Image (cartoon, helix red, strand yellow):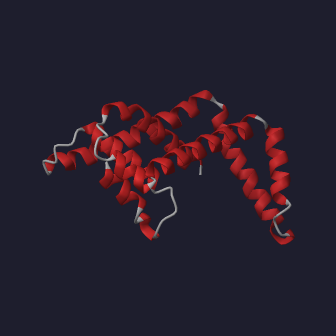
Amino acid sequence: MVERLFDGLALVILLLVLVPLVPLKGMTAEWASAGLTLALIGISVVIVVLLAGLFLVVLSPRTARALAGVGMRFVPDRFQDRVGHLGTLFYSGLESLRQPGPLAAVIALSFVVWLAEFVMYYLVALAFHTGRSYADIAFGGAAANLAISVPSLPGGVGPFEVAFVGS
């Protein structure tokens, strides 16, 4: 979950940086009609809110205990011990995010991994002489990967194609 949130944050930031570099003419109407722009904005807001909540929990053990107590009310008695143990393990895993070094490493690696993946897509685009720039490929890849966060058919069929083909 934490990895997905940081990946989402990296993709949102990449999209914001790439918007001025990518000519959006011709796809704006298609994207707007498909509702993809609104979906990406919605996903971005959800990611930012979840990350803010995650950091609130990490920085405030008292808040974490209070939220865990509320959540445990909905867990059947026979699963209380197991869920409590898993919650404790989850929270202890988040402890590393309290330290600036590991936090910076997680954020930096999210960007490095995505930028490297987009290099791979760019090399494929070069091999097929598509005429697309790295910015075009990175923008399309970021939009497509955020789009698959939207519920879809098995395998992500639907939002990925709309996002990537539209870009």
Asked if residue 160 lies left or right of residue 151, the reply is left
Task: Write the residue at 27% across / 47% down.
Answer: 120
Task: Write the residue at 79% across / 44% down.
Answer: 64
Task: Write the residue at 72% across / 37% down.
Answer: 56
**Residue 151: x %, y % from top left:** 52, 62
Q: Nearer the viewer, residue 60 or 136?
A: 136
Asked if residue 76 lies left or right of residue 38, the reply is right
Q: Nearer the viewer, residue 61 or 121?
A: 121
**Residue 123: x %, y % from top left:** 21, 45
Task: Write the residue at 45% across / 42% down.
Answer: 11
Residue extending farthest to the top is 100
- Vertical placement of residue 78 versus 112, above or below: below
- Vertical placement of residue 156 versus 4, above or below: below
- Vertical placement of residue 80 versus 64, above or below: below
Q: Quadrant of residue 86?
A: bottom right
Q: How many marks?
A: 0
**Residue 23: x %, y % from top left:** 28, 37
**Residue 109: x %, y % from top left:** 46, 37
